[in-house]
Image (spheres, rainbow, N blue to C red):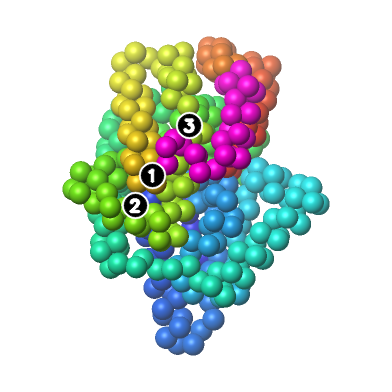
Amino acid sequence: MVGYSDSGKDARRFTAAWELYKAQEDVVAACNEFGIKVTLFHGRGGSIGRGGGPTYLAIQSQPPSSVMGTLRSTEQGAMVQAKFGLPQTAVRQLEIYTTAVLLATLRPPQPPRDPKWRHLMEEISGVSCAHYRRTVYEDPEFITYFQEATPQAELGFLNIGSRPAKRKPAGCISSLRAIPWVFAWTQTRLVLPAWLGVGAGLQDALDRGHGGELRAMYAEWPFFQSTLDLIEMVTAKADAPMAAHYEEMLVAREWRAVGGELRRELARTERCVLEVSGHSKLTAHNRSLRRLIESRLAYLNPINMLQVEVLRRLRRDDDNRRLRDALLITINGIAAGMRNTG
């Protein structure tokens, strides 16, 4: 089984994706050496931070020979209803799976053309992971900001998961399960677990003169292209002003510098992704996605504003059942509007 959730929380989505790509290559090589047919089981969540994303794109970007006529994958949380809740939708999803598996088997995706690309990926991954861990695990102010700026603590009171939000009662990030970690940031529209660290890694490579190589990797290597496209999608869905509103209403002044730095990192990630992809603006290559995102804003923005006010009141009166019910409604509404949750 290829697991995405905790690896993404520990090392960030970009680094986790690259390490899992290499691990699958090693598994396939070992099985081929001994004549064993292997079926990899992809334990993906619905969110990008937990390995989620468009099914077809994910399958087509796997390492060569890792999809040999068979594939096993999980569908979790809200994505089960979204993808299989209606008969027509379920049939369409199975068609997507079947088509992608057939193509990946008959016409496997290309490996990196230039050996230097793998070395460059290692460097980007290293810088990205180091930046992510410095922010999330080494900054003593981050955990307090996270607890105040997001509804993470309140998620434990809601009937939306099969397991406790934390493995241990301690307040550190390492004790928190991957689902509430991602879900809480999705609610505030910052979607931090999917992109934090990517801007630092790409900026470092660009500053060292690797812009041309990065653009060639994006054009010719399906794995790198899909990884960058997913990051572009979540940064397009992110809303820095809305995240700043959560901060203004819920976070004590002494912790707000953390939020300002996170929003600057989001802006840097957007700039670097656009420079590598060559797109004029986020999701410029995918007009249907852009229209979907824009069409939901008229509903999402008011729900977010309501959630902030409900959270503010609930934290002063945490036994108020009506406020808890109202919070549950806003959480469901934001999750439905943002998609890629669970």
Q: Residue at x 40, y 68 (%)?
A: 111
Q: Residues within 10 Å of mark 2 (few under 14, many from 20)?
A: some
- Quadrant for the C terminus, please: top right
Residue at 53% x, 77% y: name it: 38
- Closer to us: 273 or 98: 273
In the rendered image, residue 266, in percent from the top left (x then y), is placed at: 37, 32
- Whether residue 126 appears in magenta in the rendering, the answer is no
Q: Is residue 169 left or right of residue 67?
A: left
First of labels 2, 3 by sequence position:
2
Q: Which disc number belongs to residue 238?
A: 3
Q: Position of residue 151 (x, y in %)?
A: 52, 26
Residue type at numbered disc 1: Gly
Is residue 176 visible from the viewing direction of this image? no
Report helix, strand or loop for mark 1.
loop
Who's the residue at 58% across and 21% down the image?
301
Residue 283 within the segment the image draws in magenta: yes
Q: CA distance from mark 1 to mark 3?
A: 20 Å
Q: Main secondary structure of the magenta part?
A: helix
Where residue 77 sits, quadrant-wise, is: top right
Task: For mark 3, give the secondary structure.
Answer: loop
Secondary structure under the numbered disc 2 in the rendered image? helix
Q: Amino acid at mark 2?
A: Arg
Question: Which residue in the structure is indicated by mark 2?
Answer: 215
As drawn, the residue found furthest toward the left would be: 208
* Extent of the magenta region: 278-304
- Residue 72 position within the rendered picture, expressed as x and y whole percent measured from the top left: 60, 65
Counting other residues with Cα less than 10 Å from the Cα at mark 3, is it few (<14), some (14-19), or many (20 or more)? many
